Amino acid sequence: MRGRWASYQSPLIMKYVIRISLCLIICFHSCKNESEKKLDKFKEVNDSLKELNKDTTFATIYSRIAEKRNKNLLLFHIVDSLKDKLEAAGNFLDSLIDAIEKIDTTGERTDVVSRNLIGTRTGAALTEKTHSVYMYTIEKSAYQSSKEKIESFFTKYHGLFGTKEFLHLIDKIPTVSVATILRGVKTDCTRAAIICSRDIEVRLE
């Protein structure tokens, strides 16, 4: 049991990575004379998130549940739907991050969100797809401890996750920091899916 849960304890690193990112956003707005140092920090965090997003824990748990599907088809269909939602959000985020990084190869522009996400279909899709994963994992987890763990991943967004205001939270900051936050969102969605799928797997044992 401990071995399975240990596989996603690396998110403790993620917790601090995102906190650093959000603190850097505040610092960037208040201390622009040190913007070059801030950009370097964001680039370091961004590289760390690229590695964290290679986590295959959810796929492993999904495979184990699929093997036991005959025990409870309803639970399998729940995790199968979660897989679809997670893939849709993940693929969307990957494409979006790639697009904004191509728009600004320097990573220094601060108008990428206002020009491409706020008030656009793309921005609305970002909000809907990622929040859908969050809400689904909360709804389909049976244990309160699972729900609380999932909620803890998203408290760093100060209640703005899933709202239009979330886009304003990441507006007027360098492109590299926008990419960093979006990669963090992808990681948080994956972590939520891992907790929920493990919750479901326990019910099959």
Image (cartoon, grey):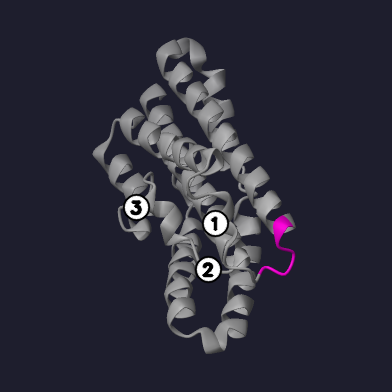
Q: Is residue 198 at all visible to an observer of this figure? A: no
10 Å crowding of disc 1: few (<14), some (14-19), many (20+): many
Question: Relative to residue 50, is residue 122 drawn left or right?
Answer: left
Amino acid marked by disc 3 = Leu
Report how far apart the C-alphas of labels 2 and 3 lie in the structure: 17 Å
Q: Are marks 2 and 1 in contact (CB under 8 Å)?
A: yes
Of the 4 image quadrants, the one containing the N terminus is: top left
Figure check: 160 above or below 67: below
Q: Main secondary structure of the magenta part?
A: loop
Look at the numbered disc 2 and give the secondary structure of its residue: loop
- Give x and y (percent) for residue 199: 38, 33
| Mark 3 closeness class: few <14, some 14–19, many ≥20 residues within 10 Å | some
Magenta stretch: give its range.
103-107
Residue 188 lies in the magenta-colored region:
no
Q: Earlier in the sequence, mark 2 or mark 1?
A: 1
Dot 2 or dot 3, earlier in sequence: 3
- Lateral position of residue 5 relative to residue 84, left or right: left
Q: CA distance from mark 2 to mark 1?
A: 8 Å
* Nearest the eye: 20 or 116: 116
SS category of the residue bearing label 1 = helix
From the viewer's perspective, is residue 170 above or below residue 44? above
Q: Specify the amino acid type for callout 2.
A: Ile
The number of callouts visible is 3
Dot 1 corresponds to which residue?
113
Residue under pointer 2 = 173
Q: Position of residue 107 (x, y in %)?
A: 67, 68
Q: Are marks 1 and 3 in contact (CB under 8 Å)?
A: no
Residue of label 3: 160
Which numbered mark, 2 or 3, is in the foreground of this view?
Answer: 2
Residue placed at 38% from the left, 44% from the top?
Answer: 162
Question: Farthest bottom residue?
Answer: 33
Residue 201 occupies quadrant: top left
